[in-house]
Image (cartoon, rainbow, N blue to C red):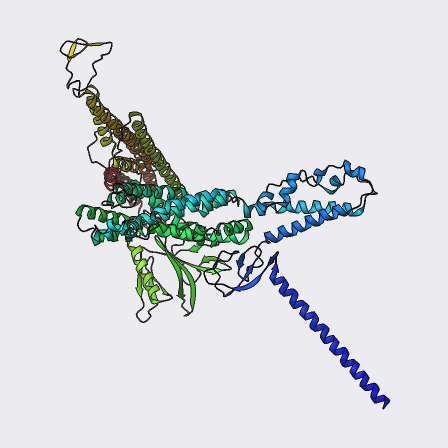
Amino acid sequence: MSRVADLSKLRQERMREINQRNKEKERMREREREAREREARYSNGHLFNSLTVSGTTLCSACNKSITAKEALSCPTCNVTIHNRCRDTLPNCVKMKQKQQKLALMRNNSAYQNVTLRNKAHLKERPNSAIYPSDSLRQSLLGSRRGRSSLLLSKSVSTNNIAGTLNDDSPLGLRRILSQSTDSLNFRSRTMSMESLNDEGEGYFTSLLEDLEDEGQEFEADSWSMAVDSTYLQTHRKDVIKRQDVIYELIQTELHHVRTLRIMDGVFRRGMLEEVQLEPGVVHVLFPCLERLLTLHMHFLTQLLTRRAHSLQPESTNNFTITQISDLLIQQFSGQCADEMLKTYSEFCSRHMKAVKLYKELLARDKRLQLFIRRVSRRPLLRRHGFQECILLVTQRITKYPVLVQRIYDNTKDNPEEAAGLSQSMSCMRELLCSVDQQVLELERTQRLQEIRSRVDPRAEAKLRSGALFRPAELLRRQLIHEGTLLWKTPSSRLKDVQVMLMTDILVFLQEKDQRFIFASLDKSAVVSLQTLLVRDIANQERGLFLISSESSPPEMYELYAASKDDRNTWIRLIQQTISSCPSREEFPLIETEDKALLRRLKADIQQKDREVLELLQERVTLFSDLAEVMGGYEVMLASCSRNLFRAESPQAPRGEQLLTQAITEVDRLTELLLGSNFEVPLPCSSNGHHNNTGALVINGQEVLVNGSQENQATQVHKTNIEVSQRLVNLSAQLHALQGVVIRQDSILELCLRESSVSPAAAGARTVRSLSRDGASDFGSLGELALLQRQHSLLQEELVRLRGAEGKLRHSERARAQLEKQLRDLKTNSATLGDGAGNAGSQAPSTRRESDTDNPLASQESMDQSDGLQECSDVEVDVISDEDDDDEVDSRIDTE
C-alpha cells in the first residue's frame, strides 16, 4: 500500500508540474500576444484604434482612399491610415510634446529636491545655461507654435553646464543636468520636422482665401440660378440654354485657372521652399506651368471683362452675353493658338513622366510626404491633389469644342455669331488634332530613345548587300509603330521578335539578357520598305506575309500578330509608310560619317536661323510697343508679319517684294511728313515766315497751308497716328528683309561649301535656291548683283574644268598611242619569229620582198590607226563637251 501511495503521489506531482508548465507557456503566449497587440496599437508614438470608415476617407500616410472597411486611427493626433501604412507614418507629434513636458517637469522637480553641499558655487553659476531667460522658459512650456522660435547653440554640453562644480558635487545633479541637456538637444534635432508640420502655411493661406473670394460670383450651378427670377422670365428658352452654356464656359475656365494657380502657388512653391527639391526636378514635375497660367489668365480676363460689359444697369448679377465668338477666335487662332499648341504639346507629352517622378519622390522623401499630408487637410486642396491637377490640365483642352458646340446649337437666330462659332470650333479641332499629333510624335521619339538605350552597342545586322547596319542608324529615323510579333522560321518554330516600323525600314529585334539585339534568324533583320509587299495569309486571321524584292531571289517573312485587329493595324500602317517612303537618293539606307556630320551641321544652321528670326520678330514687337508708348496711340501690327519670319514656311519670302514694300512705306511716310496733306502749325521755324494770306514761305517759295486753324489739332492727331503706323510697318518689312538675307546667306554658304566637290551642280543649285520664288523677275538690286556674282563664279569654274578636261584628254590620247605602239611591236616581233622559222623553205628573193613590204605595210597600218584614233578623240571631245553642257542644264532644270 505504501508503494501504491508513493506512486500516486509521484503521478500527482508530475501532473501538477505539467499543468504548471502549461500555464507558464500560456502566460508567455498571452504576454507575447499582448506585446504584439500593444506594438500594433502603439507604433511611432501613436495609440492606434481600429475603426470602420467609408470609401471616401483618405489615408493620412499615402493620401489614397481607404477601400477596406477597417482602418487605424490615432485619437492623439487625429490621423487615419491603412493597416499597411503604419510603419511609414512619422512619430506622433502630440505624444512627443507630452513626453517632453513630463521630462521637463520631472527634471525641474528633481532639480528642486537636490540638496547641494556647496551653495556658493551654485549661486555663482548662471541660470542661462539651461534656460537663458524666463521668456524662453515660458516658450518651452507654452504653446507648440510659440516653441518653434527656440534656437539652441550646438556648443551647449554637460561640461559647460557643470561649470565649476567640484568633485564633491552630488552625482544626481550631474545626471539631471545631462538629462536636461539631452532633452534640449533632442528638441533641436526634431525642430525642423515639427516646423514642417506646423509652420509655413501662411504663404498659401492667403492664396486660397483669394481663390475662394474670386469664385463667389460663380458659385451658382448655372446662369438660370445666378440671375434674378424676374430677369430670367424675360428670356426665351433657347437664350436661357445659350447663357447657361456660356456661364459654364466661364465657370470651368475659372476653375481651370484656380487649378493652375494651386499648382503654382501651393505645390510648386512648397516643393521649392519647404521640401527644398532641386529646380530641375520641380520643372519636370510642372513643365511649362507659367506659360499655361499666362495663356488662361489672359483668356479668363477677357471673359470676365465681357461679362462686366454685359451687366444690366444697377445690377451685379444680371447679365446677358450676346457675342463671344470673337474672343474664342482670338484665343484659338494665330499666335495665341501657336503658343497653346507648343505649350500643351510639351505638357501632355511629359504628363506620364511627371506622375512617375512624383510617385518615386513621394515613396522615399518624408519631407514631401509631410508636406502633401499637411496640404491635403485644406478643404479646397483635398480635391486638388498633385495627380488630380495634372490630369485636369491635360483634359481641359478637350472640353472647349464640346462647350462651343452646345453654344452653337442654341445660336440659330444670329447668323454672324453662328459663323464665328463655327470658325472657332474648326480652330479648336485643328488645335486639338495638332496637339495629339505632336504628343504622339514626342511619345514615339521617347520610345525610340528607350529602345535604342537597350540595344547592345556592339550589335549589328548584315544586309543582303553586304553592308552592316548599326544601332546608331535608328536615331536618324522616325518611329511609326512598334510591337511584338511572332516570326515563323523554316523549321516551323515561332520566335518572339520586337518589330519597329520606321521611316524607310522594318527592324526586327530580339531580347537577350534584358538587352535588344538584331534578330539573328534565317533572314536579314533590316528590311527596306521601298521594295516591300505586304499580304495577309488566307487561312490565318492573325498572319501576314512580307515579301522583300530588294535583291534576287526575293525573301518572304511569315509573321503572326496577337489578334486579327493587331494584324490589320500592322498591314495598314506598313502600307501607309510604304506610300510615303523617301527615295534612297534623298534618304540613304546607311549614312556615312561625313554625311552624318554634314546633316548635323545643316540642322544646327537652320536652328540658328530660326532663333535669329524669332529674335527679329520679338524686336518688331518691341518696336511697335515703343511706338505705342511714345506716341500714345494704339498701333496694330500686321497679322501676316509673323509668317515672314517662319523659316519652315513652304514658300520663302522674296527680298524683292519686301524691299519694294519698304520703299513704298518710305514714300508714303515722306508724303505724310512733307506732302500737301501735312498740317503745319502757325509758329514757323527760323528759315521760314508767314505772309499775310496765311501761306508759309520757305526759301522764298510760298507753300499753302490746307485746312483751317480750328481743324488743325484734329488733322495733326490723325497724321501722327498714321506716321506711327507707317513706322511700325516699315520696321516690320525691314526686319523681314533682314531675315530673308540671313536665310539666303545660309543657303549660299552651304552651296559654296558643296562647290568644292561639285562646283557646276552646286552653282546650279545655288541659282535654283535663290530664284525658286520667281523665274526671271528680279527687282532687287542686291539679289541681281548676287546672282551676277554667282554666274561669274560659275563661268570661271567651267573654264577651269574645261582646261583640266583638255589636259586629261591629251594625256589619255598619249597613253592610248603608246599602248597601240606596244601592241604593234609585239605583233611585229611575233611575225618576225614565224618568218625565221620558215626561212629554209623560202627563196631569198621572197624573203627580201617580205622584208621590204612588211615595214611599209606596218607603217601604213600605224598611220591609219593614228588617224582613226585622232578622229575618235576629236569626236569624243565634242561629245563630252555637249554631254557636260546637257548635264549642267539637266541639273539646273531638276533643281
Residue 28 in percent (x, y) is at: 70, 70
- 61 and 551: which is toward the camera: 61
Of residues 438 and 520, the one drawn nearer to the viewer in this rendering: 438
Q: How many marks?
A: 0
Quadrant that contains the N terminus:
bottom right
Q: What is the residue that sits farthest to the left in this orientation?
A: 693
Give percent across and percent down for residue 583: 31, 50
Residue 502 showing in the rendered view: yes
Apparent side of residue 203 relative to residue 293 in the rendered image (left or right): right
Quarter in which the C terminus is drawn:
top left
Q: Is residue 837 left or right of residue 683?
A: right
The answer to which of 371 and 736 lies nearer the viewer is: 371
Residue 123 horizontal side relative to residue 43, left or right: right
Q: In this view of the protein, can residue 853 be seen by the observer?
A: no
Quarter assignment of residue 85: bottom right
Please give left or right for residue 474 compared with residue 720 in the image: right
Q: Is residue 379 above or below residue 303?
A: below
**Measured along the vertical axis of the image, is residue 364 above or below residue 845?**
below
